[in-house]
Amino acid sequence: MKIIAGNWKMNGSRDSLVHMVTALQDIDSKNTVILCVPYTMLGVDGGRVAIGAQDASAHDHGAYTGEVSANMIAATGAKYVIVGHSERRQYHGETNDIVRAKAAAVIAAGLTPIICVGETMDEKQAGKTMAIIESGVRESVPNDANNNVIVAYEPRWAIGAGLTPTDSEIADAHKLIADTLTSMGLGGTPVLYGASVKGTNAAQIMSIPNVDGVLVGGASLKPDDFIPIITSVK
């Protein structure tokens, strides 16, 4: 069984989420399907599809205008929260320390964080890929995660660029993440791959050792694009 998580980013509507959820109810798949959507869509009944958010505050409550706490997200019935997505790191300056604090808040609220790590093109070209990945895991995953966490590897240089690392690059990154998590007492933690995933490459990516599923961007917005990814793994 694999985990197929969709990240809608700043797209969609409640109507389009209802349409997607309805389309997914009768899909013949044992995979875990998650849709992480904007806050305004939380509360929609996902049926067999788990609903998640795309970010959460590190704060429980208080004078933090515009922020949404993990407890508020939990109250909507959501089960997952993406933290540390590459776009949050790039556009909002989120560091590993900030991501760890957010992940801890998500876990404390009874939700499962999907913690994203990965290297930029500059870091890749400088030969720092493995060091960035390992430090991302060690510094972003809370020490008391107690296996209630998912990690997603996002080669940041590939997101939105239509680029995909080679199978060996993905395999090396995922093995490093799995080994690092094991050394932290979190062996068995699912590790997803996320960057330019689509119906035509999903099965191949998920056949790579230590790839426990995928984090899908644009291809998760329409049933005709998302369903082939879900059903690509039998």
Image (tube, helix red, strand yellow):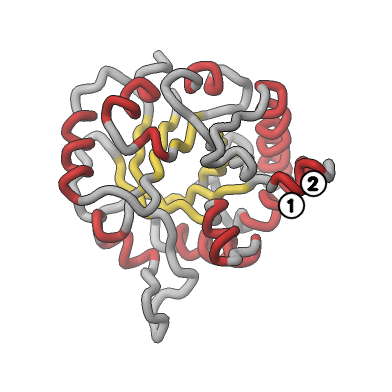
Helix or strand or loop: what does disc 1 sit on? Answer: helix
Position of residue 91 measured from the top left corner of the image (x, y, whole percent): 55, 62
Position of residue 56 measured from the top left corner of the image (x, y, whole percent): 43, 63
- In this picture, residue 99 sits left or right of residue 29: right
Counting the numbered discs, the total is 2
Residue at 50% from the left image edge and 55% from the top image edge:
83
User: Any mark on residue 174, and which?
Assistant: none
Seen in the picture, residue 41 relative to 124 is either above or below; the reply is below
User: Any mark on residue 135, and which?
Assistant: 1
Residue labelled with disc 2: 131
Seen in the picture, residue 126 relative to 173 is either above or below; the reply is below
Between 45 and 185, the one nearer to me in the picture:
45
Q: Quadrant of residue 180?
A: top right
Q: Amino acid at mark 2?
A: Ala
- In this picture, residue 156 sits left or right of residue 25: right
Seen in the picture, residue 170 relative to 232 is either above or below; the reply is below
Residue at 18% from the left image edge and 46% from the top image edge:
45
Residue at the outermost bottom position = 63
Helix or strand or loop: what does disc 2 sit on? Answer: helix
Between 85 and 57, the one nearer to me in the picture:
85
Give the spatial CA distance, label 1 vs label 2. 6 Å
Q: Are marks 1 and 2 in contact (CB under 8 Å)?
A: yes
Residue at the outermost front position = 161
Position of residue 19 measured from the top left corner of the image (x, y, whole percent): 17, 37
Could you classify mark 1 by the number of other residues whose Cα lies within 10 Å: few (under 14), some (14-19), or many (20 or more)? some
- In this picture, residue 154 sits left or right of residue 132: left
Q: Quadrant of residue 191?
A: top right
Could you classify mark 2 by the number of other residues whose Cα lies within 10 Å: few (under 14), some (14-19), or many (20 or more)? few
Position of residue 1 measured from the top left corner of the image (x, y, whole percent): 43, 23
Q: Amino acid at mark 1?
A: Ser
